[in-house]
Amino acid sequence: MSKNVIVIGGGAAGIEAAGQLAMAGYPVIIIEKGQEIGGHLLDWYHLFPDRRNSVEVVSYLNDIAENRNISILKNRQTEKIERNKGNFHLRTSAGDEIEAGAIVVATGFDLFRSEKKEEYGYGIYDNVITSADLEKMFRAGDILLKNGKAPSKIGLVHCVGSRDEKSGNLYCSKLCCVTAVKQAIELREKLPSSKVFCFYMDMRMGGAHYEELYLEAQEKHAVSFIRGKVSEVGVAHNGSLVIKAEDTLAGRPIRIELDMLVLMAGMEMSEGGRKISSDLHLSTGSNRFFSSIDNHYGSNLSNENGVFYAGTCTAPMSIPETISHARAAATEVIRYMKNTGK
Amino acid sequence: MSRFGFTITKARFIDYESNDRRISEYISEMEPSFLRCIECGCCSATCTAAGFTKFSLRELNILIKRGENKEINKTIRKCMLCGKCTLVCPRGVNTRNVITLAKEAYQKAENHAV
Ligand code: SF4
Ligand code: SF4
Ligand code: SF4
């Protein structure tokens, strides 16, 4: 029986779970498809609700990864996973062969591909971008339109690829409302003469201090919140973007011209996760994320003995939720290893 | 009923005590997707008729649900049944059928058949 634990995915969940297992004395092998660990954090500028620089969290993860019980195989994907009695045998795309007693699946999420929502014009109109593209602009330091000018009227579209039967995702991605609020504030700070509008169906500000951030966006930054789902985006004669939406609280259609539109892309089960779910026969829910054997007290447990879940491969989660979930996954793995004599 | 410290004219209420919600119930039974509406306004944003005249399918939906039947009759005929609303609804409401049923139900209600 192998004492090794394989962690699939080197994002916040994978690294945190690996760190806990390494501290408990288990040799951990992390398989990461990218060149760096940190997952989506690497693409994000500031985190909500306190607008901390994501670099700080990435460096926390890098410190964990220093543990000598941890080895990280980067630029690799899992090619094949087999079960052989109590052990797992995994082969990576680079040909590594690894034996392990348990597997932590931490394959995270993929952002909804906004071009699939064709009526919003992502990939068609120059100044329709996604929340992830905006984070890159924040990182680069300049918020610019394709013509090199700064935008003066910016619209943020909530629920892109979430809560939308047409996109095949009925669930709420939970974190895009607060992302929109955070981004609206940062846009107003970087471009003080700009006007920012959020088009939402419901403001879901459930996390700690999210509602306060919403209040700040209204009070300090004069962000306009308009309740109405955007149905289509087009271009006016003068080149500005026009949207179709109803101001449902006023009960009338809106006419507005915008320079830039930011689509709040939702979270979906990752492609990597889907592959592993078929290799290991892991159950998924109607939302396509992994489904645990118990929603209340077993959210880290899969339907396969020895396979555990950490983080957003099970549902959209914030960073603190992901870290907690990953720690809980490590606890479950340790219990399993002890019970099976590993 | 206890008295509030202010007066409010009767017409301001959506009167849950006396509104007749049979039209709403009829539509929900014949077209259960009607129950899924979240009043997002995507249908009314894209609506062909709404561009020309004061008409909002979203508003119509909520009025039907609340049993504000007088209001329904005033506006429902503005719909041209083009079906664009069905294409954009994030909740998969079969909006065109809702309108057809609403018209039908209203007719029946007028003839006291629902
Ligand atoms: S968090 Fe907000 S924007 Fe994201 S899916 Fe939920 S309601 Fe929509
Ligand atoms: S688009 Fe659908 S959910 Fe939205 S208001 Fe219209 S019918 Fe209701
Ligand atoms: S079917 Fe009626 S309500 Fe729907 S878009 Fe066409 S005119 Fe508007």
Image: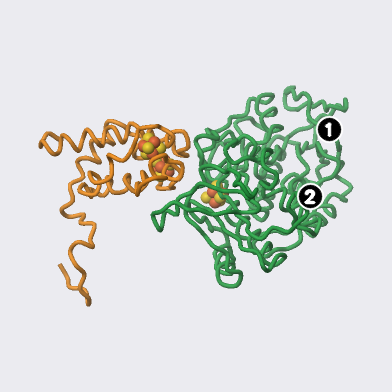
Chain colours: A green, B orange
Instruction: Work out whether residue A95 or residue B71 is closer to the camera in this orientation and state it.
Output: B71
Q: On the image, which quarter does residue B75 sit in? A: top left
Horizontal side, residue A72 vs residue A171: left or right: right
Q: Quadrant of the C terminus of chain A?
A: top right
Q: Is residue B33 above or below residue A139?
A: above
The 10 Å Cα crowd at callout 2, few under 14, some 14 to 19, many 20 or more, is: some
- Label 2: state its secondary structure: helix
The residue that mark 1 highlights is: A76
The amino acid type, in three-letter code, at marker 2 is Leu
The amino acid type, in three-letter code, at marker 1 is Arg
The 10 Å Cα crowd at callout 1, few under 14, some 14 to 19, many 20 or more, is: many
Q: On the image, which quarter does residue A110 sit in? A: top right
- Label 1: state its secondary structure: loop
Horizontal side, residue A98 vs residue B34: left or right: right
The residue depicted at 63 percent of the width and 25 percent of the height is A281
The residue that mark 2 highlights is: A42
Inspect this view and state whether residue B37 appears. Answer: no
